[in-house]
Every structure is written in structure tokens, then in C-alpha cells.
Image (cartoon, grey):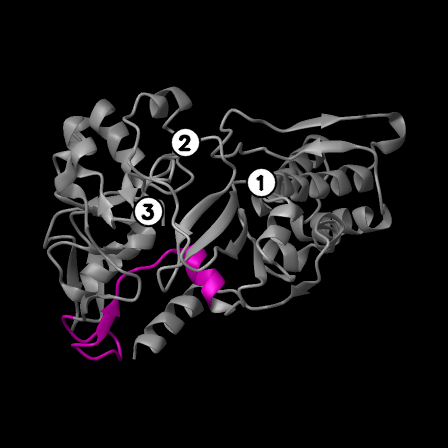
Amino acid sequence: MHGVMFWKAGRGCKWTGTGQRFEPEEVSHLITWRDSRCSSNFLSSLPPPWSHVSVATGFGCATIYWYLQNKPDFLKHYDVSGTIQDYVASMLCGLQRPRMSTQNAASWGYFNTTRKSWNTDILGKSHFPVHLLPEVVDPGDLAGETSCVWHAIPKGTAVGAALGDCQCSVNSCLPESTDAVLYIGTSAQLTILAPVGFQPGESPDPRSPRTYIPYFGNRYLAVAASLNGGNVVSAFMDMLTEWMAELGLEVPRSTLYQRTIQAALAQADTALSVSATVFGERHTPEERASVADIVTSNLSLGHVTRALCRGMIRNLHSMMPSQCLVEAGAKRILASGNALSRNEVLRQEVERMYPFPVVYGKDMEAAVGAALVMLRRQ
């Protein structure tokens, strides 16, 4: 939902066979939310947005600004841009220009969610190529209709405008207003519905660890979106694998992971402290991971793994403390995601940090949430 790609209007793909598939033609590569080319200094040089959403590296508009200042000829090859979901919807419908939902637009930066419009005046004054920006529609509105038969889907089938993956993941579990929703996959997100009628301000706070993103029915989600989730455990596994290889040993990654978690489960507590922000955070991009309170008695694999998992949840708690959930009226936490389902240590640390009943196993799939939006529309 933050990523961006570019294509030529009307020439973004070619259909093959009898309309069974389309192949990218005049398109760029996808630049994802994990792109880190926009440094803090670069971001601080950009004009302040007229929006409550801060602009971070990996956001669509920030990436376009980077190309504008560093590789302007690249942008001359294209006249349309969007998320990869917007591209797919546009190709299915044969659109000249994509229709982007407010959810994806907000995730690009320089979009005022209250007025539902791009900051075209601010962008235009800095020579930003505003012609690249998509038309914006409400979540649940249509992008168009399929322009031909696509596998078993007939021509003329309604295609919804692409939606935010965070919003759809939350929507898929149909939470009550008193439910906080925790999802830990590659990254980590903790959300809760903002009160009915809530409206965010129109200026960002770059140092705030929480933001408000457009949901459905003109509501907002309060979100702590951490860049550090399952990718931290994966990086730890990579490190252990490399150490083993340097020692001339080879252990299957699945076996290494299983034994690492078992060691941590056998170590119920630890005084070792790990700040697990390996990938920084959007509100503190300069932050790095660290280890403290090291003594000879807490250097075992169990201590280190337990401290790493605790550090991940402690970081999320620093972004969305228990008190914030209490004030929002939370009664329980619905928790899901591959990182949580595979890691009992993480689940233990969630329950240690947050004094709420935690319900696991609630399916949270963005595709399911998006489908539910279209079903309600029907």
C-alpha cells in the first residue's frame, strides 16, 4: 500500500492468448515500502504536507520526489503511477488512468484524508509531477469492470478499487469497537478503531509512533505500525546460520529455528535486555538495535532468544502502550500473523506486556477483508 510503480497509460500490459493473462509491458519495477533510499536529511528537505500523515521513506510520493531530484529522466518514460494493486485493477479494467482508494492514497503521503484530495498546490510549487497521481475514490468504490474474460471471470465483472492491506487485515476479522487487533508478520501492527466522528489534524507529527489511517465507513484506525516484526527473528536466524557455517557446521534452518524457540521456552525469564529495532522505525529512522545488561550467566541461546522476542514486543508497547488501549476502551486483543502463530515465546511476551485477554488464531487475511468489502457492496 506504500509502494509505487510506473507505467504508460493504455500500454501497461499486453494480453496473451484469449484474454487469459496479461504480461507487463511498458512498466517500471515495483519500489516497495522497504525501500530506504530517502534518508532523514532528504525527507527533511521536502515541503511539509497538508496532512496528518508524515512522509517516510518507502512512501510513494517520497519515492517520486527522490526520482525527481536524482533521476528525473526516469520519470519521463511514464505518465501514470500507482500501487501494484492499482496497476492490476487498471489492467483488468483497461483503464487509461488508475482509480486509487483513499486508503492507498493516504499511505503515499501528501494526501489530506479529511478533504480526500492530494496536496496539489504544495506539490506543484516544488515541480512534483502531479500528473502522475491517480484519481482518488472512497474504499468500496469501483475501479471499473473487467474489459475481457479473465480465466473463468466474465467480461463486465465489477472490480473494486484496491484497498490498504492493514485495513483489510483488520476488516477480515470483523472486530468489535472494543477489540484491539495485533498482527505480526514481516512487520508488526497494533490497531484499534478510533471513536465515531474522530477526525485527525491537518499537520503531521513526524516523531509520533502512532498514526491514524482511513478505515471503512468514514472511520479511522489508530495504528502503531512497527518496521520490526518477524523480519527481526529472520535476521537472527540468518546470523545463527552464518555463524554455524563459519564453524563448519550445517543445520537445516527449520531445525535451527525449532531448537532456538525450545531453548527460549525453557528460559522463562531473563535480565538480558535487547532493543530489537534492527530496521529502525518511521518515527525514529536513526534508531538501531542494541544489547544491554550482559553478564556471563545470560549468554545462552535461551536467554538471548527470550530477550530478543521480549524486545520486539516491548518496542511495540512503547509505540502503543497498554494505557492507550485502556483509554480507547479495549477489552481484548485479537492476535494473528505467521510470526505469532509459529513462535510461542512471542505469544508469551505479548501476554506479559499487555494486560488483556488475547485471542489467537483469528484469521486475518487482507484478501478476505477486501472480499468482504465487495460482498457488503453487493
* Residue 261 within the magenta-colored segment of the rendering: no
Q: Which residues are magenta?
A: 147-171
Q: CA distance from mark 1 to mark 3?
A: 20 Å
Tell me the amino acid under the disc marked 1: Met
Instruction: List the residue tagged with mark 3.
Output: 106
Q: First in sequence, mark 1 or 2: give its number.
A: 2
Instruction: List the residue tagged with mark 1.
Output: 319
Q: Residues within 10 Å of mark 3 (few under 14, many from 20)?
A: many
Position above or below: 129 against 258 = above
Q: Examine the rendering and report whether any part of residue 78 can be seen.
A: no
* Residue 160 within the magenta-colored segment of the rendering: yes
Asked whether 164 or 345 is in front, the reply is: 164
What element does badge 1 sit on? helix
What element does badge 2 sit on? loop
Q: Position of residue 260 (x, y in %)?
A: 75, 46
Tell me the amino acid under the disc marked 3: Ala
Badges 1 and 2: C-beta atoms under 8 Å apart? Answer: no
Position above or below: 311 against 373 = above
What element does badge 3 sit on? helix
Q: First in sequence, mark 1 or 3: give its number.
A: 3
Asked whether 316 or 8 is in front, the reply is: 316
Position above or below: 266 against 366 = above
Q: Position of residue 266 (x, y in %)?
A: 86, 49
Tell me the amino acid under the disc marked 2: Ser
Instruction: List the residue tagged with mark 2.
Output: 36
Report which quarter residue 168 is drawn in: bottom left
Q: CA distance from mark 1 to mark 2?
A: 21 Å
Callout in the foreground (1, 2): 1
